[in-house]
Amino acid sequence: MSVDEIRVWPPADADPPPVPGPAAGGVPVVNGTPAPQAPGPGQCLRTYLRDLGWFGVKKGCDSGDCGACTVHVDGLPVHSCLYPAARSAGRRVTTVEGLAGTQATPDGSLHPVQVAVLEGQAFQCGFCTPGLVMTAAALRDDQRADLARALKDNLCRCTGYGSVRRALQPWGAQRGDPVRRPPRAPESADVVTGRASFTLDTSAPPGMVHLRLVRSPHAHARVVSVDASAALAVPGVIGVLTHQDAPPRRYSSARHEIDADDPADTRVLDDVVRHVGQRVAVVVAESVVAAERACRLVAVTYEPLPVVLDPVQALADGAPVVHVGPGGRPNVCAELHGGIGDVDRALAEAAVVHSATYRSQRLDHGALETLACRAWLDDDGRVTVRSSTQTPFLTRRALAAIYDLPPDRVRVVTGRVGGGYGGTQELLIEDVAVLALLVTGRPVQLEYSLQEQFRATPTRHPMAVTVTAGTAADGTLTALRVHVVADTGAYGNHGPGALVHGCSASVAVYRCPNKQVSGYSVYTNNAPAGAFPGDGLGQVIFAVESAIDELALGLGMDPIRFREVNVVRSGDALISYHDGPEELTVGSYGLDQCLRLAAAGLAELPRPEEPEAPAGWEIGDGVALAMIATIPSRGHHSHATVRLTPGGRYEVLVGTAGLGNRATTSYAQLAASVLGVGLDRVDVREGDTDLVEHDTGDDGSTGIVVAGPATVRAAQDLARAIEGAAADLAGVDPARCRLVGDVVRCADDPIPVVLVQRAMQASGIAAEGRGVAGGSPRSVAFNVHAVRVAVDRGTGEIRVLRSVHAVDAGAVLNRQQCRGRIEGGVAQALGAALFEEVRLDAHGGVATGWLREYPLPSMADVPPTRVLFADTCDELGPLGVKSIGQGPYNPVAPAVANAVRAATGIRFTELPLRPDRVWRALAELGDVEGAGDTTGRPRILF
Amino acid sequence: MDLNSVTEVHCRASLPGWRPGDAWLAGGTWLFSEPQPDVTRLIDLTTLGWPALTVRPEGLEIAATCTIAELAALRCPPEWTAAPLIRQCCEAFLASFKIGSVATVGGNLCAALPAGPMISLAAALDGSCTIWAPDGRRRSISVAELVVGPHRTTLRPGELVRSVHLPAAALTARTAFRQVSLRPLGRSAALLVGRAEPGRLVLVVTAATKRPVALTLSPRPDSAQLRAALEGGVAPELYHDDVHGDPDWRQHLTLTLGEQVRAELVGREAG
């Protein structure tokens, strides 16, 4: 033993540990200034810092898993939601707001990491960005070399980490576009410095009170009585509201242009609860602490009612009735039946037939900014709601209807929205907030915890999709039958839409003379499902694209070739389950290009950044395609205003909420191109029902293709107004005047816009243009995903070695942002394909209430995705553009399943492809001889 | 998250005496990660100035308040052949280095999660824990005696873990490490360590099981002996069942990884 002395680590001569003074009531120095007040005893550092007004410190998961709250304490990055605030006393705390002022940049300019993230546009919604910046700024060189490990708990739901990886390569290694730097999103500097204002990143209205909700422990029960006496005795409690305080009107939490598209089955507070976690009562209190305490003291007496949790059982005669559906049938929220040709005959004559039932799981959106809103009365007595909604105008309309208010007496505004993904295309919190506001007269705030968001907000619709498909020996698809059973849960929000939409483009993308589609969206006492990326398509496409693969393999034909033979072409009618006219057209056709690009992407030699397959693992390639309408059906409207401000800048006003970069940047780009000015002269204001007349919302990926054309028209309208005024000034025909940047060319005479503007002001003409767009007719976009996986038969682990995504999104306005959007969709979908799953307990309540139980993909889970663009130009979209939004999500899971089939010979029919399940299937069904056999009959895992 | 029921934070020295509602605060990374509605006072152990790591001829003394980052940075004496295991376990956390610079070894032991990497490390290296009781008495127990199930320890009210001792005999052994989780860099579904000492091979199963299991084998077991030991020593119901992996898979991983560990330490020829 050569340990000849006792060594103590860290050595005694190292810095002595700072003496924290929790008991002494000391304060930290925050961003260079001693904090004005001491932290509370049980407070976490995040709350303390936000209370001090440092809103760059985000509240995400609140359990240490997401990293959005990262700050530096004495130079060390920590998750401030886990750090006892009392321990910060006497220490130096730096938030993202103070980063630029640290030693790295004594001149106060941006920190190099902020510059890198800004230049690389390594964000979309930007909610996780402050935490990412603070973590990256503290990395050593060796940590930077293994970013996936260093950033494993900096979760980003939007970007898919591609832009983050590129931006955070060792500083100075980034290479921008050598010719032209791509346009940056407005607010970029605010996002990287923490100044961007999300829903609760403003000072609270004076006198604001807090709401907490009492939730049902029963899957189905009548509320017999509510005894609030003990709760009301808690100091600080103002009131407890129940169904007796709530208006009787029923509505749907789903927000669509046409209210009747979703069944009106929901009350603000109901006297019957239909799922575990449904809200039963609202506690209003001076503080969150008092409200939480009081919640536990509200005594509710329930009369339990019969429960049905299985959607197939719910369709059976005599099943407990959750709701009578709009069609009059118990538990049928929506159904559809239709077809063309004779599927039975075609199947009888087919050379190869495949039939299986494919199950897609329940999923959570995983937005890191939890649902939150404030409601107050403005100086004029008008109900004002600041919320994280994706649909401010439709939320206003619903609130006005529920509370019998004229729409102009309700205003809904949004801040920047920290991830939506459909999760806020619902009225989930604003209704109770306004109830509490109207009853108490006090400004109110309701903020969900992430646990609450997991347990009590809608998920993706789980679906069982039975596909039966047949092909002729020459590779012609002859029969396609799809039967869908979707579990909409206790309420029908988005139930009809997910069913109808899900069965539409998924089936219509294939030319096939015999098609039959049937489907049910079924009420159960499970947690409700709702709007989700893909809007039902992902679940049906998983089934159809798996079946198409089996047909190709059954014929011994290359799956890509089989698809090339059978997909719709330019000019084809799009037929899903009825042979009728749709206002859906192929505005540009790039599916053939996408398939070729994907095939070429798979054939390429490995790139250095690609992971290598571990020795002994089986390798397989898989491909799947997805068509999607560029705009949701049944109405999508936008109004836009563009005006010339007194300062000589152009301002675009739109009604959408600020969900990400691409749409917002595109409004500025579209207006700038019409007006002939640089992007730096255009400001975009959005997310306020006072700005324009109406907007359906930025759901269904529509910002760019609906609010976009409205913006173009408004800019054109403004240009005409300016040209008209210039014509008057010059005394020439307006037809001879043309606005070009800062001048109007009248005949040959350039008149500065400044002079025209003065003349307009003098004669009282508003320098303002308006535009409207209706979202019809609609085009289709195409996505093809190709993936190479390695599978370990010993453990069931799957590694994605290569991911290639080809997209036909029409003309590409901003390659950097399109790429980011696609990488983000692919990453979300890889999570869904491989491990994400909302689990329910035995009573239909959500059991996975934490990020640790419902992990979102981290950088380590997502390989770099190569994004390839088809060269097309849409005849319907603005400047030839098509929406991207949710489209890239849909083909990824079936591509992965097809690749695993190729690697192992086993057809997986259930998502996610978790290692434990893959291993079990391999152990039960896989024999050594069949390993890697991709041509024989599959062993199907049911 | 905020622990709203907490009304006081104390140093241990300033505390009148243990009472229900008191909680020991070390790094805080577990305590502040879940609601603690019954906790009313926090007693901050990190103010006590315990030396994080003490290297002695007889082994390594790790204070309960030693952070994961401090442990990972330890420069071990060259004859400690098990030193790589310290880093491997410090990197086996689901959480990143940011948590590791705050979270403590003692906190990880007391959280008693099946996948707690410090439980794996201490169990793999024959660690014993020094427990302080509120009446001033001290006792020493093995990690297997401390951690008895998910979130379950044998600590009595008011007791705390003062330190964990890793004996030199274990630190100078050869070790082999295997870990599998549902996701790359995810929470361990099975973490196995083998320790080859003169006269015996010890196989320690963690993460896959509800509590750590140490099996003592002959110095050069063959595959069949190893399998028999695992099947006999780990009852099927001891395999952990939660969202991080199904129990039958964890059992399979335990057998698979156990064989890999055996092969690394003994050599394949013995199989």
Image: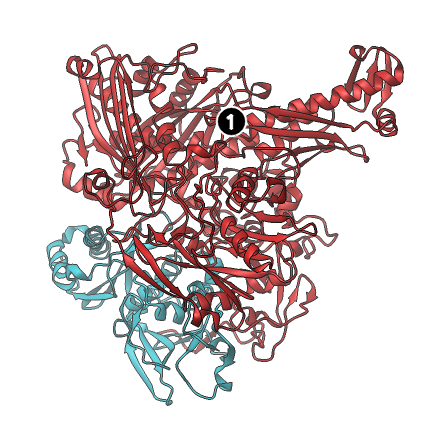
SS at badge 1: loop
Res A363 → quadrant: top left
Using a 10 Å C-alpha cutoff, classify the residue at mark 1 as few (fewer than 14 neighbours), some (14 to 19) or many (20 or more).
Answer: many
User: Which residue is more in the foreground, A280 or B83?
Assistant: A280
Residue at 13% across, 61% down = B229
User: Which residue is more in the foreground, B26 or A297?
Assistant: A297
Question: In the picture shown, does residue A413 fall above or below A469?
Answer: below
User: Which residue is more in the foreground, A94 or A301?
Assistant: A301
Query: What shade has chain B been given?
Result: cyan
Name the spot of residue A74 as percent of width and height, x first. 60, 65
Residue at 22% across, 38% down = A312
Residue at 51% across, 16% down = A872
Chain depicted in red: A
Regarding residue A769, the answer to whether it shows in the image is yes
User: Which residue is more in the foreground, A516 or A61?
Assistant: A516
Type of residue at label 1? Ser
Name the spot of residue A936 as percent of width and height, x first. 17, 24
Return the residue at label 1.
Answer: A883
Question: In the picture shown, does residue A656 fall above or below A854?
Answer: above
Name the spot of residue B169 as percent of width and height, x first. 28, 72
Regarding residue A608, the answer to whether it shows in the image is no
